[in-house]
Amino acid sequence: MRAAMLQIRLKRLRRRSHQRIARELYFDIGSRVRRLLLVLLGVAIAHTLAMLWFEDIGVSDAIWLTLTTLTTVGYGDFSAATVGGRVATTVLLYAVGITVLAQLASDYIDYRLQRRQRMIEGKWDWDMEDHLLVINTPKFNGAHYCEILVRQIRETPAFAEVPIQFLTTGFPHGLPDALRAHGALHRHGEADNADDLARVEPENARHIVVLAHDHYDRHADSLTFDTTHRLMQHIDRNRTHVIVECVNDANRQRLRDLGAHSVIRPIRAYPELIVRAIVSPGVETMMENLFTHHGDHSQRYNLPVDGLRWADLVAGLIQADLGTALAYTDETGEVICNPPSDTRVHGTGLIVMVRADQEPTPARIRECLAGIARQSAHAAAAASD
Protein backbone atom coordinates (compact mmCIF):
# COMPACT_ATOMS: atom_id res chain seq x y z
CA MET A 1 0.00 0.00 0.00
CA ARG A 2 2.80 2.40 0.93
CA ALA A 3 4.68 1.51 -2.25
CA ALA A 4 1.57 2.26 -4.34
CA MET A 5 1.06 5.61 -2.59
CA LEU A 6 4.74 6.47 -3.10
CA GLN A 7 4.46 5.61 -6.79
CA ILE A 8 1.42 7.85 -7.18
CA ARG A 9 3.23 10.73 -5.47
CA LEU A 10 6.28 10.28 -7.72
CA LYS A 11 4.05 10.37 -10.82
CA ARG A 12 2.43 13.59 -9.59
CA LEU A 13 5.83 15.16 -8.89
CA ARG A 14 7.10 14.24 -12.37
CA ARG A 15 3.94 15.59 -13.99
CA ARG A 16 4.14 18.86 -12.08
CA SER A 17 7.84 19.13 -12.96
CA HIS A 18 7.03 18.73 -16.66
CA GLN A 19 4.26 21.31 -16.36
CA ARG A 20 6.67 23.74 -14.68
CA ILE A 21 9.27 23.30 -17.46
CA ALA A 22 6.60 23.81 -20.15
CA ARG A 23 5.41 27.00 -18.43
CA GLU A 24 8.98 28.32 -18.22
CA LEU A 25 9.58 27.65 -21.94
CA TYR A 26 6.30 29.34 -22.81
CA PHE A 27 6.96 32.42 -20.74
CA ASP A 28 10.58 32.52 -22.01
CA ILE A 29 9.31 32.86 -25.60
CA GLY A 30 6.82 35.51 -24.50
CA SER A 31 9.49 37.58 -22.77
CA ARG A 32 11.82 37.21 -25.76
CA VAL A 33 9.10 38.48 -28.09
CA ARG A 34 8.64 41.52 -25.86
CA ARG A 35 12.38 42.20 -25.79
CA LEU A 36 12.66 41.92 -29.58
CA LEU A 37 9.76 44.33 -29.97
CA LEU A 38 11.57 46.87 -27.83
CA VAL A 39 14.81 46.40 -29.81
CA LEU A 40 12.94 46.76 -33.11
CA LEU A 41 11.20 49.90 -31.88
CA GLY A 42 14.55 51.36 -30.80
CA VAL A 43 16.12 50.60 -34.19
CA ALA A 44 13.17 52.18 -36.04
CA ILE A 45 13.36 55.33 -33.91
CA ALA A 46 17.15 55.58 -34.37
CA HIS A 47 16.85 55.22 -38.16
CA THR A 48 14.07 57.80 -38.33
CA LEU A 49 16.21 60.28 -36.42
CA ALA A 50 19.16 59.49 -38.70
CA MET A 51 17.04 60.21 -41.78
CA LEU A 52 15.97 63.54 -40.29
CA TRP A 53 19.61 64.39 -39.59
CA PHE A 54 21.22 63.25 -42.85
CA GLU A 55 18.41 63.54 -45.42
CA ASP A 56 16.40 66.58 -46.43
CA ILE A 57 12.94 65.09 -45.58
CA GLY A 58 10.21 65.69 -43.04
CA VAL A 59 9.14 63.54 -40.07
CA SER A 60 6.36 61.67 -41.87
CA ASP A 61 8.62 60.91 -44.85
CA ALA A 62 11.39 59.72 -42.51
CA ILE A 63 9.01 57.35 -40.76
CA TRP A 64 7.65 56.12 -44.09
CA LEU A 65 11.18 55.47 -45.42
CA THR A 66 12.10 53.55 -42.24
CA LEU A 67 9.02 51.35 -42.39
CA THR A 68 9.18 50.55 -46.10
CA THR A 69 12.88 49.68 -45.84
CA LEU A 70 12.51 47.67 -42.63
CA THR A 71 9.69 45.56 -44.06
CA THR A 72 11.62 45.18 -47.37
CA VAL A 73 8.68 46.63 -49.31
CA GLY A 74 10.80 49.37 -50.87
CA TYR A 75 8.38 51.47 -52.93
CA GLY A 76 11.28 53.61 -54.20
CA ASP A 77 9.52 56.94 -53.64
CA PHE A 78 12.14 57.79 -50.98
CA SER A 79 15.66 56.52 -50.44
CA ALA A 80 18.79 57.54 -48.57
CA ALA A 81 20.88 59.80 -50.83
CA THR A 82 23.68 60.94 -48.50
CA VAL A 83 26.61 58.83 -47.34
CA GLY A 84 25.58 59.17 -43.71
CA GLY A 85 22.00 58.16 -44.51
CA ARG A 86 23.13 55.09 -46.45
CA VAL A 87 25.54 54.02 -43.70
CA ALA A 88 22.79 54.44 -41.07
CA THR A 89 20.36 52.42 -43.22
CA THR A 90 22.91 49.65 -43.79
CA VAL A 91 23.88 49.36 -40.13
CA LEU A 92 20.53 49.96 -38.45
CA LEU A 93 18.09 48.31 -40.86
CA TYR A 94 19.98 45.86 -43.08
CA ALA A 95 22.33 44.51 -40.38
CA VAL A 96 20.07 44.78 -37.32
CA GLY A 97 16.47 45.68 -38.06
CA ILE A 98 15.59 43.09 -40.71
CA THR A 99 17.33 40.36 -38.71
CA VAL A 100 15.41 41.30 -35.55
CA LEU A 101 12.15 41.49 -37.51
CA ALA A 102 12.67 37.99 -38.94
CA GLN A 103 13.49 36.62 -35.49
CA LEU A 104 10.46 38.40 -34.04
CA ALA A 105 8.15 36.90 -36.67
CA SER A 106 9.55 33.42 -36.01
CA ASP A 107 9.23 33.75 -32.24
CA TYR A 108 5.72 35.19 -32.51
CA ILE A 109 4.62 32.22 -34.63
CA ASP A 110 6.14 29.86 -32.03
CA TYR A 111 4.40 31.83 -29.29
CA ARG A 112 1.01 31.51 -31.02
CA LEU A 113 1.51 27.82 -31.70
CA GLN A 114 2.50 27.16 -28.09
CA ARG A 115 -0.44 29.25 -26.91
CA ARG A 116 -2.83 27.17 -29.00
CA GLN A 117 -1.20 23.94 -27.84
CA ARG A 118 -1.51 25.02 -24.19
CA MET A 119 -5.20 25.75 -24.76
CA ILE A 120 -5.76 22.33 -26.31
CA GLU A 121 -3.86 20.49 -23.57
CA GLY A 122 -5.63 22.39 -20.80
CA LYS A 123 -2.64 24.42 -19.64
CA TRP A 124 -4.16 27.81 -20.44
CA ASP A 125 -5.64 30.10 -17.77
CA TRP A 126 -9.07 31.06 -19.05
CA ASP A 127 -10.75 34.24 -17.87
CA MET A 128 -14.09 32.82 -16.69
CA GLU A 129 -17.16 34.52 -15.21
CA ASP A 130 -20.51 32.99 -14.16
CA HIS A 131 -19.38 29.69 -15.63
CA LEU A 132 -20.28 26.08 -14.93
CA LEU A 133 -17.27 24.30 -13.45
CA VAL A 134 -17.13 20.48 -13.61
CA ILE A 135 -14.45 18.90 -11.42
CA ASN A 136 -13.19 15.39 -12.27
CA THR A 137 -14.35 13.04 -14.98
CA PRO A 138 -15.60 9.46 -14.57
CA LYS A 139 -12.92 6.79 -14.61
CA PHE A 140 -14.87 4.63 -17.07
CA ASN A 141 -16.15 6.05 -20.39
CA GLY A 142 -15.48 9.55 -19.11
CA ALA A 143 -15.44 11.22 -22.53
CA HIS A 144 -18.77 9.69 -23.54
CA TYR A 145 -20.40 10.65 -20.24
CA CYS A 146 -19.13 14.25 -20.44
CA GLU A 147 -20.28 14.54 -24.03
CA ILE A 148 -23.85 13.56 -23.09
CA LEU A 149 -23.74 15.81 -20.03
CA VAL A 150 -22.61 18.88 -21.99
CA ARG A 151 -25.05 18.22 -24.82
CA GLN A 152 -27.98 18.01 -22.40
CA ILE A 153 -26.85 21.18 -20.65
CA ARG A 154 -26.74 22.98 -23.99
CA GLU A 155 -30.23 21.74 -24.84
CA THR A 156 -31.54 23.63 -21.81
CA PRO A 157 -32.38 27.15 -23.11
CA ALA A 158 -31.20 28.94 -19.97
CA PHE A 159 -27.78 27.25 -20.24
CA ALA A 160 -27.31 27.28 -24.01
CA GLU A 161 -24.59 29.95 -23.79
CA VAL A 162 -23.20 29.40 -20.28
CA PRO A 163 -19.40 28.86 -20.31
CA ILE A 164 -18.47 25.31 -19.28
CA GLN A 165 -15.05 24.39 -17.94
CA PHE A 166 -13.65 21.04 -16.78
CA LEU A 167 -10.90 20.62 -14.19
CA THR A 168 -9.57 17.12 -14.78
CA THR A 169 -6.56 15.02 -15.73
CA GLY A 170 -8.81 12.81 -17.84
CA PHE A 171 -7.99 14.59 -21.12
CA PRO A 172 -4.17 14.91 -21.23
CA HIS A 173 -4.18 15.39 -25.01
CA GLY A 174 -7.06 17.83 -25.09
CA LEU A 175 -10.83 17.73 -24.98
CA PRO A 176 -12.56 15.45 -27.49
CA ASP A 177 -13.91 17.24 -30.55
CA ALA A 178 -17.49 16.60 -29.45
CA LEU A 179 -16.93 18.58 -26.25
CA ARG A 180 -15.11 21.44 -27.96
CA ALA A 181 -17.93 21.63 -30.52
CA HIS A 182 -20.29 22.50 -27.65
CA GLY A 183 -17.97 25.27 -26.43
CA ALA A 184 -16.51 23.40 -23.45
CA LEU A 185 -13.04 24.30 -22.14
CA HIS A 186 -10.78 22.52 -19.72
CA ARG A 187 -7.89 22.97 -17.37
CA HIS A 188 -5.57 20.00 -16.88
CA GLY A 189 -5.21 19.59 -13.14
CA GLU A 190 -6.55 18.18 -9.90
CA ALA A 191 -8.81 19.78 -7.34
CA ASP A 192 -6.57 18.65 -4.47
CA ASN A 193 -3.86 20.91 -5.89
CA ALA A 194 -4.45 24.42 -4.57
CA ASP A 195 -2.76 26.02 -7.59
CA ASP A 196 -4.85 24.03 -10.11
CA LEU A 197 -8.05 24.83 -8.25
CA ALA A 198 -7.27 28.54 -8.10
CA ARG A 199 -6.62 28.65 -11.86
CA VAL A 200 -10.23 27.66 -12.68
CA GLU A 201 -11.56 30.55 -10.53
CA PRO A 202 -14.24 28.72 -8.52
CA GLU A 203 -15.14 32.01 -6.82
CA ASN A 204 -16.45 33.29 -10.18
CA ALA A 205 -18.43 30.15 -11.03
CA ARG A 206 -22.22 30.11 -10.90
CA HIS A 207 -22.48 26.32 -10.63
CA ILE A 208 -19.88 23.74 -9.56
CA VAL A 209 -20.29 19.99 -10.09
CA VAL A 210 -17.93 17.58 -8.30
CA LEU A 211 -18.09 14.18 -9.99
CA ALA A 212 -16.98 10.97 -8.29
CA HIS A 213 -13.93 9.74 -10.18
CA ASP A 214 -14.78 6.07 -9.57
CA HIS A 215 -18.42 5.39 -8.72
CA TYR A 216 -17.52 1.81 -7.73
CA ASP A 217 -15.03 2.90 -5.07
CA ARG A 218 -16.49 4.15 -1.79
CA HIS A 219 -13.12 5.74 -1.00
CA ALA A 220 -13.85 8.23 -3.79
CA ASP A 221 -15.91 10.14 -1.24
CA SER A 222 -12.69 11.06 0.56
CA LEU A 223 -11.48 12.97 -2.49
CA THR A 224 -14.95 14.51 -2.92
CA PHE A 225 -14.93 15.62 0.71
CA ASP A 226 -11.47 17.18 0.34
CA THR A 227 -12.48 18.95 -2.87
CA THR A 228 -15.70 20.28 -1.35
CA HIS A 229 -13.82 21.54 1.68
CA ARG A 230 -11.36 23.40 -0.55
CA LEU A 231 -14.19 24.88 -2.61
CA MET A 232 -15.93 26.28 0.46
CA GLN A 233 -12.81 28.34 1.18
CA HIS A 234 -13.16 30.07 -2.21
CA ILE A 235 -16.85 30.49 -2.94
CA ASP A 236 -19.86 32.41 -1.67
CA ARG A 237 -22.55 29.78 -1.01
CA ASN A 238 -25.28 32.34 -1.63
CA ARG A 239 -23.95 32.89 -5.15
CA THR A 240 -22.51 29.54 -6.24
CA HIS A 241 -24.54 26.33 -6.30
CA VAL A 242 -22.40 23.27 -5.48
CA ILE A 243 -23.49 19.77 -6.55
CA VAL A 244 -21.45 16.75 -5.44
CA GLU A 245 -21.70 13.04 -6.10
CA CYS A 246 -21.61 10.66 -3.15
CA VAL A 247 -20.87 6.94 -3.52
CA ASN A 248 -21.59 5.91 0.07
CA ASP A 249 -24.99 7.07 1.37
CA ALA A 250 -23.53 7.27 4.89
CA ASN A 251 -21.47 10.29 3.75
CA ARG A 252 -24.40 12.30 2.38
CA GLN A 253 -25.09 14.30 5.51
CA ARG A 254 -21.39 15.00 6.06
CA LEU A 255 -21.16 16.57 2.60
CA ARG A 256 -24.31 18.62 3.24
CA ASP A 257 -22.90 19.78 6.57
CA LEU A 258 -19.74 20.80 4.74
CA GLY A 259 -21.75 23.12 2.48
CA ALA A 260 -22.82 21.18 -0.61
CA HIS A 261 -26.25 22.29 -1.84
CA SER A 262 -27.11 19.03 -3.62
CA VAL A 263 -25.73 15.55 -2.90
CA ILE A 264 -26.63 12.84 -5.41
CA ARG A 265 -25.63 9.32 -6.32
CA PRO A 266 -23.36 8.84 -9.35
CA ILE A 267 -25.75 7.32 -11.89
CA ARG A 268 -23.55 7.14 -14.97
CA ALA A 269 -26.27 5.94 -17.31
CA TYR A 270 -28.33 9.06 -16.62
CA PRO A 271 -26.40 12.36 -16.80
CA GLU A 272 -29.78 14.13 -16.86
CA LEU A 273 -29.73 13.79 -13.06
CA ILE A 274 -26.82 16.24 -12.88
CA VAL A 275 -28.49 18.55 -15.40
CA ARG A 276 -31.71 18.66 -13.37
CA ALA A 277 -29.70 19.45 -10.23
CA ILE A 278 -28.17 22.40 -12.08
CA VAL A 279 -31.28 23.70 -13.79
CA SER A 280 -33.96 22.91 -11.17
CA PRO A 281 -32.33 22.32 -7.78
CA GLY A 282 -34.37 19.86 -5.73
CA VAL A 283 -35.82 17.96 -8.68
CA GLU A 284 -32.82 15.63 -8.60
CA THR A 285 -33.92 14.28 -5.20
CA MET A 286 -37.25 13.12 -6.57
CA MET A 287 -35.64 11.69 -9.70
CA GLU A 288 -32.96 9.91 -7.68
CA ASN A 289 -35.59 8.17 -5.58
CA LEU A 290 -37.07 6.71 -8.74
CA PHE A 291 -33.88 4.66 -9.14
CA THR A 292 -33.94 3.20 -5.62
CA HIS A 293 -36.29 1.43 -3.23
CA HIS A 294 -35.37 3.71 -0.33
CA GLY A 295 -37.62 6.59 0.74
CA ASP A 296 -40.14 7.59 -1.90
CA HIS A 297 -40.20 5.28 -4.89
CA SER A 298 -42.48 4.35 -7.76
CA GLN A 299 -44.62 1.24 -7.57
CA ARG A 300 -46.76 -0.38 -10.24
CA TYR A 301 -50.23 -1.71 -9.35
CA ASN A 302 -51.84 -4.00 -11.89
CA LEU A 303 -55.46 -2.99 -11.30
CA PRO A 304 -58.20 -2.21 -13.81
CA VAL A 305 -59.19 1.45 -14.11
CA ASP A 306 -62.36 2.14 -16.07
CA GLY A 307 -63.45 5.69 -16.87
CA LEU A 308 -62.12 7.60 -13.87
CA ARG A 309 -61.09 11.18 -14.52
CA TRP A 310 -57.32 11.54 -14.02
CA ALA A 311 -57.71 14.60 -11.77
CA ASP A 312 -60.17 12.72 -9.50
CA LEU A 313 -57.90 9.67 -9.40
CA VAL A 314 -54.82 11.70 -8.41
CA ALA A 315 -56.70 13.74 -5.81
CA GLY A 316 -58.36 10.64 -4.33
CA LEU A 317 -55.06 8.80 -3.80
CA ILE A 318 -53.47 11.86 -2.22
CA GLN A 319 -56.43 12.46 0.11
CA ALA A 320 -56.28 8.83 1.19
CA ASP A 321 -52.53 9.27 1.86
CA LEU A 322 -51.70 6.38 -0.44
CA GLY A 323 -49.31 8.17 -2.78
CA THR A 324 -49.18 10.26 -5.94
CA ALA A 325 -50.23 8.81 -9.28
CA LEU A 326 -47.58 9.38 -11.95
CA ALA A 327 -48.83 7.37 -14.92
CA TYR A 328 -51.18 4.60 -16.01
CA THR A 329 -50.98 1.76 -18.50
CA ASP A 330 -53.67 1.79 -21.15
CA GLU A 331 -55.45 -1.25 -22.57
CA THR A 332 -52.60 -1.87 -25.03
CA GLY A 333 -49.99 -1.84 -22.26
CA GLU A 334 -48.51 1.55 -23.19
CA VAL A 335 -47.47 3.73 -20.24
CA ILE A 336 -49.15 7.16 -20.32
CA CYS A 337 -47.25 9.65 -18.15
CA ASN A 338 -48.86 12.74 -16.63
CA PRO A 339 -51.95 12.89 -18.87
CA PRO A 340 -54.20 16.00 -19.00
CA SER A 341 -56.39 16.36 -15.90
CA ASP A 342 -59.68 15.70 -17.77
CA THR A 343 -58.44 12.44 -19.30
CA ARG A 344 -60.79 9.49 -18.75
CA VAL A 345 -58.52 6.65 -17.75
CA HIS A 346 -59.19 3.26 -19.30
CA GLY A 347 -56.31 1.04 -18.38
CA THR A 348 -54.91 -2.03 -16.71
CA GLY A 349 -52.62 -0.51 -14.11
CA LEU A 350 -51.29 2.50 -12.21
CA ILE A 351 -47.78 3.72 -11.41
CA VAL A 352 -47.80 5.49 -8.07
CA MET A 353 -45.10 7.30 -6.08
CA VAL A 354 -45.34 5.80 -2.58
CA ARG A 355 -43.42 5.95 0.68
CA ALA A 356 -41.32 2.92 1.54
CA ASP A 357 -42.46 2.91 5.16
CA GLN A 358 -46.15 3.10 4.21
CA GLU A 359 -46.35 1.24 0.93
CA PRO A 360 -50.04 0.53 0.29
CA THR A 361 -51.21 -2.93 -0.71
CA PRO A 362 -53.03 -3.54 -4.01
CA ALA A 363 -56.20 -4.14 -1.99
CA ARG A 364 -56.04 -0.65 -0.47
CA ILE A 365 -55.45 0.94 -3.89
CA ARG A 366 -58.39 -1.05 -5.33
CA GLU A 367 -60.62 0.06 -2.44
CA CYS A 368 -59.61 3.69 -2.94
CA LEU A 369 -60.38 3.51 -6.67
CA ALA A 370 -63.80 2.08 -5.91
CA GLY A 371 -64.46 4.94 -3.51
CA ILE A 372 -63.37 7.49 -6.13
CA ALA A 373 -65.74 5.89 -8.65
CA ARG A 374 -68.66 6.09 -6.18
CA GLN A 375 -67.94 9.73 -5.42
CA SER A 376 -67.76 10.54 -9.11
CA ALA A 377 -71.07 8.79 -9.73
CA HIS A 378 -72.76 10.68 -6.85
CA ALA A 379 -71.36 13.98 -8.14
CA ALA A 380 -72.63 13.24 -11.64
CA ALA A 381 -76.09 12.31 -10.31
CA ALA A 382 -76.26 15.48 -8.21
CA ALA A 383 -75.26 17.59 -11.20
CA SER A 384 -78.00 16.01 -13.38
CA ASP A 385 -80.65 16.72 -10.71
Image (cartoon, rainbow, N blue to C red):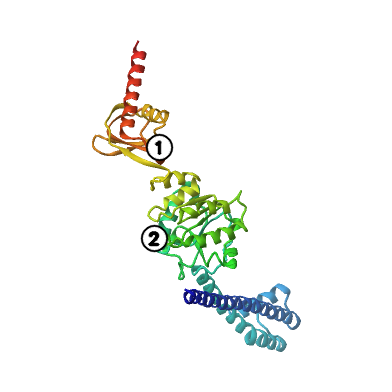
Q: Nearer the viewer, residue 367 or 45?
A: 367
Residue found at x 40% / y 37%: 358
Question: Residue 120's spot in the image, x, y percent?
Answer: 49, 68
Left or right of 345 in this view: 245 = right
Residue sitting farthest toward the front? 357
Residue sitting farthest toward the top? 385
- Asked if one can make out residue 220 in the rendered structure from this viewpoint, the answer is yes
Left or right of 164 in this view: 234 = right
**Residue at mark 2:** 144
Question: Residue 107's spot in the image, x, y percent?
Answer: 57, 78
Q: Report, in whole angstroms, how far the alpha carbon at label 1 lies from the one at label 2.
A: 40 Å
**Element marked by disc 1:** helix
Question: Is the residue marked by circle 2 packed among few (<14), some (14-19), or many (20+) residues within 10 Å?
Answer: few
Q: Nearer the viewer, residue 178 or 293?
A: 293
Q: Quadrant of the C terminus?
A: top left
Foreground: disc 1 or disc 2: 1
Left or right of 46 in this view: 98 = left
- Asked if one can make out residue 74 in the rendered structure from this viewpoint, the answer is no
Question: Residue 303's spot in the image, x, y percent?
Answer: 28, 33
Query: Residue 204's image quarter?
Result: bottom right
Residue sitting farthest toward the left? 332
**Residue at mark 1:** 358
